[in-house]
Image (cartoon, helix red, strand yellow):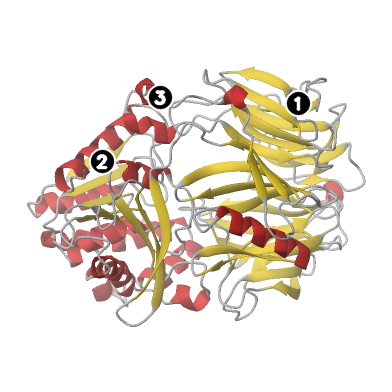
Amino acid sequence: MKTRFLGSCLAAIALVLTPTTAFAKKKDDSKYDRPYDKFFERPMMWSASLSPDGTHLAMARRDKDDNNFIIIQDLKNPNAQPTGINLGDELEVQWVDWANDNRVLYSVFKPWRGTLNSRPIIRMFGMDKDGKNNLLFFKNNKQISRSQVIQSPVSFIPNDPDHVMVPVQIGDDLDVLKVNVKTGKSSLAAKGSSGTRGWLADINGNAAFYITVTDNGSTLNYYSRIPGTNGKNAKFQLAKTVRRDTTSNSTNLDFAPVGPAASPTQYYVIARPGDANFAGVHLYDFEQNKFIKEVFTPPNSDIVSALIDERTGTFEGATYLEKGRVRYKMASKRDQAHIKALEQYFGDGVVPRILGVSTDKNEMLFSASGPGQAPTYHVYDKSEVYAREVGKQMPELESYGVGEIVTYKARDGLELYGYLSQPKNLKPGEKAPLIMFPHGGPESRSDFRYSFIVQMLNWKGYSVFEPNFRGSTGRGLEFADKGRRQWGKAMQNDVDDGFAHLVAQGIADKDKACIMGFSYGGYAALAAATLTPNQYQCVVAGAAPADLFQMLRSEKSKGEFGYNYWTRHIGHMTDDAQDIIQVSPAQLAANIDDPMLIHHGDRDFIVPFEQGEIMVEAMEEAGKDVTFIKMNDIGHSWPTEKDEVRNEFFDALLAFFDEHLPAK
């Protein structure tokens, strides 16, 4: 059974910590070229997967010499030696999953260095759980031999454990192949096109949706199967078009398929049908393009994720937000009790996240992480009410910060919350310099999770506050709507009010704070510098919209769907011109009186690189000092790959804070 979630409880859980010592590493900062390099280390364990019968764990691991391994661990025999294969240090494991109780599938690629136009060649393999019969799929297919896209299986076909459905790039098309996991033989199951970017399958493994991406990646189009067609001759019709969050890749709450239902024409989707305020899990007939019934919607927030048993097509549970904290709603009371026990065991600082459940629903694989803890992996036996740690994603990385949820009220009385991470060694009554860190989007949110940026700043001695201002997701459509056309206004006030609250509570010093943000968060940083100068000791803006008029023109050139979305968010270029001018940082550069660092990737197609150049030019024309970092071959992201671009940026960032906001 493929179940992407969990299950149950009693009273207390005994957690035995038994990490795999063969891959443990002694903590040693001296090996790093720069001390902060440790926050960018590649994970030592990832893509953990529980076998359907719950007896084995497959995972990708890395050793101290950067060799990649596929490791298979016998969970029922602790003394058994792990099996697997050494892939060397030139290949990177992309994903690992079980096809059946005996066969493990995995894909690898050779990491590339260079421009964003470089693409890796991907390969897919299968092997038995004893490490034998390792098979390269599509070996003799010349059309696939240099494929740049082999996605993880979209269906582990119920009642057919020897076959899986795999999207594969064939020529310029992304098609679906039915693959025999023992022999490697494959046949065409569904035909895509050059615009196809993904597939979803129904309960029987047949293609239900294909997905295209338009407007430079900012729009998703879901095409659903037309009634009376199926298999490789299936026809599809446009069902839904939604915005894709290019900042956080979080789920779109207007429409997002999450798993097949028992009926071959139905799917579970996260959606807001009609005039619903909160997003919930709904049953949807994709051939008829209509909602059948509501399955679960939280009373006061949006759904975060859903757990679907892909073998039976049943709803097993969901997660949602409760005042910023992830909560579970399980379909069975027994599973709800188990979750409650796990939450009590780990405490408020860590969130358990279900990764897989065995066919008999007794064993569960989950990760546990929080603001101060990188993910650890655990297997839980419900019958014994017993969990044990089976590995750490980043075993060498210490915790440098402690996180908590802070609630506060905006100046108009709206209740808000954010995430505060403070240095772990902070003494009682001591105030660390504060960095305000608003999220991007803006229709996105900060989560109660591990962040390498936040931990790095905690390590340097800073507290970090991530406010979820109005317009953020997770609290319903009405809350999101409160942020429309509030750039530089109520949304900005919410950030400022969060800072004021921390000062009033004695957590922060009003004269020892900076603001930093990326994407919309970068705009919020620029808005702080131009609308409320001297509020912060310094400002850092990354990939920030600076000239809102030019930003709207850029969006219009990409397509009407995205342009209409941003018009609703920012304003109409003609009708609302004066309002836009009053909150557009490039038009207000003369107001700036704070030290400023701006950084932008020259391959950013979400917020064009010219936005950074426009802001720098406006500041220079106004006679203002600014540090500008052009990040070569970087898109809409932080530079995380170890190279001179990352070194230049983080050297400059930390030096900037050292100068303008020194910490102990």
| Label 1: few (<14), some (14–19) or many (≥20) C-alpha neighbours in 10 Å | few
Q: Is residue 141 left or right of residue 325?
A: right
Q: Amino acid at mark 3?
A: Asp
Q: Secondary structure at mark 2?
A: helix
Q: Amino acid at mark 1?
A: Asn
Of residues 518 and 215, the one drawn nearer to the viewer in this rendering: 518
The residue singled out by tag 1 in the image is 79
Q: How many marks?
A: 3
Give how far across and how far down residue 6 sits, in percent. Answer: 72, 55
| Label 3: few (<14), some (14–19) or many (≥20) C-alpha neighbours in 10 Å | few
Cα separation between marks 2 and 1: 48 Å
The residue singled out by tag 3 in the image is 28
Mark 1 touches mark 3? (CB < 8 Å): no
Picture residue at 11% right of the left edge, 57% below the top: 593
The residue singled out by tag 2 in the image is 653
Give how far across and how far down residue 509 sits, in percent. Answer: 20, 60
Q: Secondary structure at mark 1?
A: loop
Q: Quadrant of the C terminus?
A: top left
Tell us which disc is closer to us: 3 or 2: 3
Of residues 55 and 411, the one drawn nearer to the viewer in this rendering: 55
Cα separation between marks 3 and 2: 24 Å
Residue found at the very far right of the displayed protein: 159
Give how far across and how far down residue 314 sits, in percent. Answer: 81, 62
Tell us which disc is closer to us: 1 or 3: 1
Cα separation between marks 1 and 3: 30 Å
Q: Quadrant of residue 631?
A: top left
Q: Amino acid at mark 2?
A: Leu
Check the image and report above or below for 211 versus 659: below
